[in-house]
Amino acid sequence: MELSKRLQTIASYVTEGFRAADVGTDHGYIPIYLVQHKRCPHAFAMDINEGPLQRAKQHIAEMNLESRIDCILSDGLDGLPQKDVDSVILAGMGGDLIVQILERGKDKLSGVKELILSPQSHPERVRLWLHQNGFRILQEKMLIEDGKYYVICRAVHGTESYEKACFYDFGRFLIMEQDPTLLEYLNLEYQKYEKINQSLVDLSKEHIQKRKTEVEQRLGAIKEALGYYEM
């Protein structure tokens, strides 16, 4: 099975030999790939909806992998087989939903060795949750697919916090490594927010004042992150 670049990157972040659970598996492509490529001896395809889980079961059966991939109908981490899972994958959903799932199921994460997360929005909230709940980020990558920017990170148990807000906004690893895809994203974000800022001229209205403050804060964080590329 061939995966998109984004899904391949997510799969590559799973430690070889670990048993992985893909939460919100949809078609089951990641568990199939992990088992087929002998990265995982066993995997779990989990989804809250019966429809996607049935599609995953069908694809797993087509690959004759029923003995090595279990399908679990589960709301978030509710059905996570804790003793059998080393790696939890949460991808293809917004950052707020990822945080919600992690927060509601955090009592199930004590035995999990790593989290592979790819929020489609608000990655800063995911990074902050990790640090506030005893995880540290070991790897992070940004890539572009079909015109959209994606962040993928790998976190393990540990203590960590970032000293600068821009590291939460855009990823300390990405900034310090001067990631070229992040640079492209930062430049586009700067242009977008600068244009918004210039349009906010009627400061007699309270909601415009508030929006202008938010936009200027965002511009400040972008400028701070861009400063690391000039070092």
Image: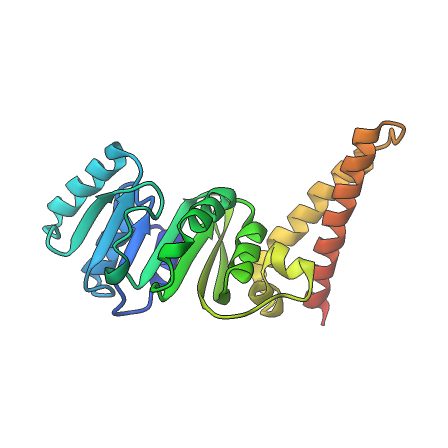
Q: Residue at x 19, y 60 (%)?
A: 42
Left or right side of 113 for 229? right
Where in the figure is residue 117, as x and y percent of width and height? 43, 55
Where in the figure is residue 148, as x and y percent of width and height? 51, 44
Coloring scheme used: rainbow
Left or right side of 146 for 80? left
The extreme front residue here reads 107
The answer to which image quadrant residue 40 occupies is bottom left
Foreground residue, 63 or 81? 81
Is residue 89 visible in the rendered image? The answer is yes
The answer to which image quadrant residue 161 occupies is bottom right
Where in the figure is residue 171, as x and y percent of width and height? 58, 60
Is residue 3 visible in the rendered image? The answer is no
Q: Total label count? A: 0
Left or right side of 56 for 89? right
Q: Residue at x 87, y 28 (%)?
A: 202
Q: Quadrant of the C terminus?
A: bottom right
Foreground residue, 229 or 68? 68
Left or right side of 16 for 159? right
Q: Residue at x 30, y 64 (%)?
A: 86
> Eyeballing the image, is 214 above or below 229?
above
Where in the figure is residue 66, as x and y percent of width and height? 12, 50
